[in-house]
Amino acid sequence: MKIGFIGSGGMAKALAGKWAANHDIVISGRDAAKAAVAAQSIGVASGTAPEAAAHGDVVVLATRHEDVFAAIDQAGGPEAFAGKTVIDINNPVSVETFQTTRDDGRSLTEAIAARLPGASVVKAFNMAQVAVWEDPDMSYDGRPLVTLYTSDDPAADAVVEALIRDVGAEPVKHGGNLHAYQLEAAAAIVIKFLFAGRDTHTVLNLIQPEIKPVH
Ligand SMILES: NC(=O)c1ccc[n+]([C@@H]2O[C@H](COP(=O)([O-])OP(=O)(O)OC[C@H]3O[C@@H](n4cnc5c(N)ncnc54)[C@H](OP(=O)(O)O)[C@@H]3O)[C@@H](O)[C@H]2O)c1
């Protein structure tokens, strides 16, 4: 697949690093030199945000959650994302109150989907810490990590499921994007326990019950 990243921080490097062998990836950031260094460290290409958005059939929004809408605008606005699968990995969570920061009871995912009506927006990869995504072996006693996602488009389901398998995890659809706020609230629990010192690999990670070969 052709995948563009808006953002080139920890999560972009972890996911792009896992996908680099099988996919054609361009990552971007606000600072071109910084994005180039990040890209080089995992063996993928870098570009500007508009270039990364134009490159991807799949575009991953991987800025801090506060920067998502500014980043969408800087990448070219809604037209730049039309016809693409957009993966929202972001957690709108306060690290002071450990609550979600959206106050309308809806998710950031739904707000992004409203901003990008021509795209298929999915929520995924938000519930485990970056060290988990970086781990070359995402199985636990032979049982793979389960990655919950939400989506309103069956074609996007197939795309995100393939990408979840490509990081070494097992996809499970939680529902449509109407349910994405639950994944964001679940991430708030994860983040709270991480801040309290619990281990990244054992904090609220769902594990597949059967032993399965890891992809
Ligand atoms: N870290 C985790 O464990 C984790 C786990 C699951 C989900 N998430 C979610 O994933 C998202 C990314 O987290 P992260 O840890 O990767 O953050 P990060 O390391 O802080 O990286 C954020 C990246 O976004 C870039 N950026 C900011 N504004 C931008 C803009 N307008 N246009 C283009 N790029 C922009 C930053 O560039 P600069 O370097 O120039 O600031 C940086 O490269 C967050 O929303 C977070 O909630 C994080």
Image: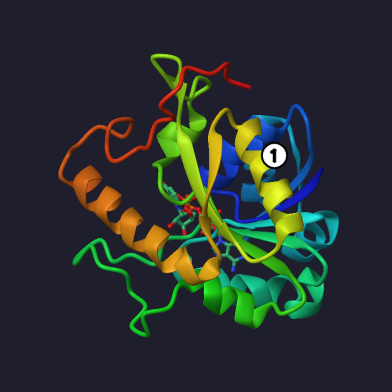
Determine which residue is flagged by label 1: 162
Q: Is residue 49 left or right of residue 88?
A: right
Residue 15 vs residue 153, the one in the foreground: 153
Picture quadrant where residue 15 is located: top right
Q: Residue furthest left?
A: 196
Q: Residue furthest front?
A: 210
* Amino acid at the residue labelled 1: Ala
- Residue 98 lies, with reference to residue 42, above or below; the image says below
- Asked whether mark 1 lies closer than 8 Å to ligand 1, one says no
* Horizontal and vertical percent position of residue 60: 65, 55
* Horizontal and vertical percent position of residue 170: 54, 34
* Horizontal and vertical percent position of residue 151: 61, 61
Task: Please give the name of the residue rendered at 62% of the width and 70% of the height, measured from the top-left corner.
Answer: 71
Task: Please give the name of the residue rendered at 63% of the width and 33% of the height, measured from the top-left corner.
Answer: 165
Picture quadrant where residue 161 is located: top right
Q: Is residue 67 left or right of residue 18?
A: left
* Horizontal and vertical percent position of residue 91: 42, 61
Colour style of the rendered protein structure: rainbow
